[in-house]
Amino acid sequence: MNLLGLSSPAADMELQPGTSLVLFSDGLIERRDRDIESGVDFLRSSLHNAQASPDRLCDLILRTMVGSAGRSPTT
């Protein structure tokens, strides 16, 4: 990805059928009361073994991440 003239390393990954790929911004995981790495760990643990439709996965992520702090993510 090349954003604002900055580049990042490329990676290839083969996903198996039924695998979910979750893309998110730091606004979902970063909070005043926890660092980004803790937010990623929290998101990862909340999705571990979660099997649902894409719509339900989005609902689960929002309920878990936004509901976990009782307020909107920091933007």
Image: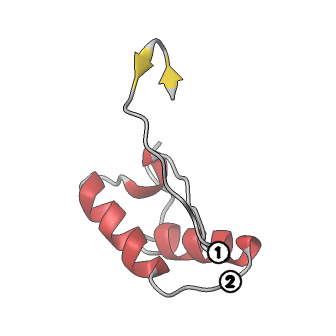
State the residue in front, 47 or 64.
47
Check the image and report above or below for 70 versus 23. Answer: below
State the residue in front, 40 or 13.
13
**Where residue 35 sits in the image (x, y, percent)?**
24, 54
Q: Give the residue drawn at x 49%, y 55%.
A: 13
Q: Which residue is mark 1?
A: 57
Residue type of the residue flagged with mark 2: Ala
Residue type of the residue flagged with mark 1: Leu
Q: Is residue 43 left or right of residue 1?
A: left
Q: Give the residue drawn at x 35%, y 62%.
A: 40
**Where residue 32 sits in the image (x, y, percent)?**
29, 52
Residue 53's image quarter?
bottom right
Residue 16's image quarter?
bottom right
Label 2 environment density (alpha carbons within 10 Å; few <14, some 14–19, many ≥20) = few
Q: Which residue is mark 2?
A: 52
- Residue 33 makes an appearance in the image: no
Check the image and report above or below for 65 versus 45. Answer: above
Q: Dot 2 lies on which element? A: loop
Q: Give the residue drawn at x 68%, y 83%.
A: 52
